Image: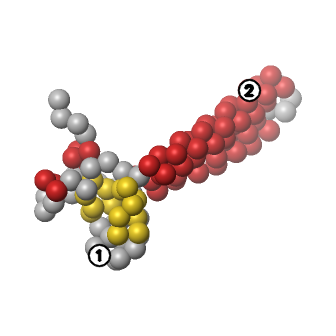
Amino acid sequence: MKPYKNKINRIRSFALSLIFIGFVIMYIGIFFRENQIVMTIFMFLGLIAILGSTGVYAWIGMLSTKAAQVVCPNCGKHTKVLGRVDMCMYCREPLTLDPTLEGQEFDQALNRKKS
């Protein structure tokens, strides 16, 4: 199982990867210079990926302004917590704002609402 990271950093990494994916798609389009329709489709798909990245960055920026800011008890730095449980951005210490979850082992499923 891959190590869990802070939610804000994961979403930012996804947005950054969308930019690089968009550039790669555009570069693939260069190989189809003879067929301008195919090249235009690849350029358009790359542009869509880059614009999607811009949307994700705007969304996480707005989400980040609403996130609760806490001081990590382990490293003493300020970090933001999204949801009921999250990790410290710096030292990956499990953090929670819900007093009923304190002392429990960290699990991503604790953020899901139970039906």
Q: Nearer the viewer, mark 2 or mark 1?
A: 1
Q: Secondary structure at mark 1?
A: loop
Q: Categorize mark 1 by other alpha carbons within 10 Å: few (<14), some (14-19), many (20+).
A: few
Could you say where residue 39 lies in the image, as x and y percent from the top left? Answer: 79, 30
Asked whether disc 2 touches disc 1, contact meaning CB atoms under 8 Å apart, the reply is: no
Q: Which residue is mark 2?
A: 41
**Image point 86% across, 29% down: which residue?**
34
Q: Categorize mark 2 by other alpha carbons within 10 Å: few (<14), some (14-19), many (20+).
A: some
**In terms of image quadrants, where is residue 93?**
bottom left
What's the amino acid at mark 1?
Asn
Q: Answer with mark 2 or mark 1, whichever residue precedes in sequence.
A: 2
Could you say where residue 1 lies in the image, as x and y percent from the top left? Answer: 29, 54
Q: Which residue is mark 1?
A: 74
**Image point 31% across, 56% down: which residue?**
86
Q: Secondary structure at mark 2?
A: helix
Nearest the eye: 68 or 74: 68
Q: Is residue 40 above or below residue 62?
A: above
Q: Is residue 80 left or right of residue 22?
A: left
What colour scheme does the image use?
secondary structure
Nearest the eye: 9 or 19: 9
Q: Is residue 103 above or below residue 41?
A: below
Q: CA distance from mark 2 to mark 1?
A: 50 Å
Q: Quadrant of the C terminus?
A: top left
**Image point 26% across, 45% down: which residue?**
111
What's the amino acid at mark 2?
Ile
Q: Is residue 65 left or right of residue 115?
A: right
- Can residue 94 be seen here? The reply is yes
**In terms of image quadrants, where is residue 40?**
top right
**Image point 70% across, 45% down: which residue?**
23
Q: Residue furthest top?
A: 37
